[in-house]
Amino acid sequence: MEAGLTFALPLLLAPLMLGLINRTKALMAGRTGQPLLQTYHDLFKLLRKGAAYSRTTTWVFRAGPTVGLAAVLVASALVPLGGVPAAFAFPGDLILFAYLLGLMRFFTVLAALDTGSSFEGMGASREVTFSALAEPTLLLGFAAIARQTGSLSLSPMYAGLGSDAWRHAGPALALLAGALLIVFLAENARIPIDDPTTHLELTMIHEVMVLDHSGPELAFILYSSALKLWLLGSLLVGIVVPVRSGIVWIDTLAMLAGLFALAVVTGIVESSMARWRLLRVPQLLVGASALSALALALILR
Amino acid sequence: MNLWTDSILVLLALASLLLLGSSRIAGCIRIVAFQGLLLGLLTLTVQHGTPSLRPLALATAIIALKGVAFPWLLARVLRDAEVRREVDPLVSYTVSLLIGTLALALSLWLSQRLPLPTKPVASLLVPVALFTILAGLFVIISRGKALTQVLGYLVLENGIYVFGVGLVQGTPMLVELGVLLDVFVAVFVMGIALFHINRAFDHIDADRLAVLRD
């Protein structure tokens, strides 16, 4: 039942996080903003529509969103919600998780290249560059947690990150949380790395790759990016919120509160910062890798 | 394991990393000032037993000099020199950060092989000291402006101080104050020299000084 819970919650609530971020941004800007459930409405609207395909595209273009959604659905079966274990757990699933996200990215990039638009190629090139820099941070961070908890599977790893771990390795976990926050912002195409709202060609990375998709496939993309936001968010919140009471509903509620707080924080970051120059983004990501490496070094010693 | 000492050491290492990645001279000066503040706090946290007046006095002297006086002096030089406010790196910031990470790994490896006369206060102390020294050296080598070289020298000295404070319990205060005085004179002289270099050549780019001829 717990396993079903950790699998069902993201499926139901992930689009709500996007709504929370947008609402926070609107409130910070003094607007009322869209309803909290707007993402759900968008998804249903898109699902009812038909799709338009350019004549230059092939099956790769149509496969992209579906494979992306499938990959992120499998990934969501691997990610625990703090102390509550995931639907599936086996040694080494952290590598599978990292590369399922990689697979999703790879197919998004292929679909973007398949359109033949030079514009989307540019976005694809940027996406690949930045994610190559963000990946070491994630994997080094996983290595640090694995070492700390003596396990190679995400569910036991996060179950072991209670307040005891904070007492023993507080500085390292704080560094790790900082590094994962940067990865969270970078992988989900958030400010200061990428701007999810702009359609200005020179600045966008992720948005540009999905310009040619329409209808149900755009809904798939929207839904899988919401799920990705939730998954990476729960990896971060699982470190920051050390509630491991053993009682399922307390742990779940704590994690949900943490995730919604993370959405609000993201909204505040987006309202208070400008997007960074593209040249400075690699610097930020390498800095995040350095944080992760330092955390690993602290735990290894 | 003392949590405070550990946190301060981690912050010291982070400040050095930040220094390698930051592009503004004013920002670099602030980072070095922050390191000075941390050194003062470190002097207090590594003490064992009853709190006494001596470390407190030393910590105050360090914070006053490294945290306030030097940054103020260097900020003044920066303002008077009216040079471009960017660091002018010879190695790009991203590569600097990568080299910083490698230096961190190197100092962690080195600190485990280094035979030490006494056990250091915290196991993180020696790697952080070595890393700070390496970061200071790297800033001296890789940044073009004479002002950033002074900053590199200060970071290098900070590293040496971290090494001393945690390893040798009860260094006579006279020695510590003497070292502080030396550093003070050095930075003071360098500040004046920078001012004169700027007066004479209209720039403080060290690599351009090397090709001077009549």
Image (cartoon, grey):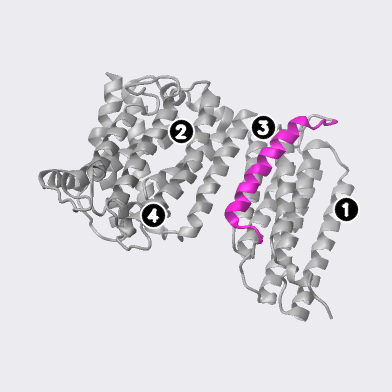
A99 in relation to A93, above or below: below
Q: Which residue is mark 2?
A: A239
Output the chain of dot 1: B
x, y percentage for residue B80? 69, 76
Output the chain of dot 4: A
Q: Which residue is mark 1?
A: B178
x, y percentage for residue A251? 36, 26
Marks 3 and 4, how far apart at CA: 40 Å
- Asked if the residues shown at circle 3 and circle 1 are in contact, with their CB atoms under 8 angstroms apart, the answer is no
Find the magenta span and give its range: B90-117
Name the kind of residue labelled 2 in the image: Ile
From the viewer's side, name the closer residue of A146 and A240: A146
A54 in relation to A108, above or below: below
Name the kind of residue labelled 4 in the image: Asp
Question: In the rendered view, does A229 fall on the left or right side of B148?
Answer: left
Residue B105 belongs to magenta span:
yes
Q: Residue at x 54, y 31 (%)?
A: A144
Tag 2 and tag 3 share a subunit: no
Crowding at mark 4 (Cα within 10 Å: few <14, some 14-19, many 20+): many
Mark whose residue sits in front, 1 or 4: 4
Q: Residue at x 39, y 54 (%)?
A: A194
Crowding at mark 3 (Cα within 10 Å: few <14, some 14-19, many 20+): few
Which callout, 2 or 4, points at the residue further toward the start of the chain? 4
Name the kind of residue labelled 3 in the image: Asn
Name the kind of residue labelled 1 in the image: Gly
Tag 1 and tag 2 share a subunit: no
Q: Which residue is mark 3?
A: B2
Question: In the rendered view, does A56 fall on the left or right side of B116?
Answer: left
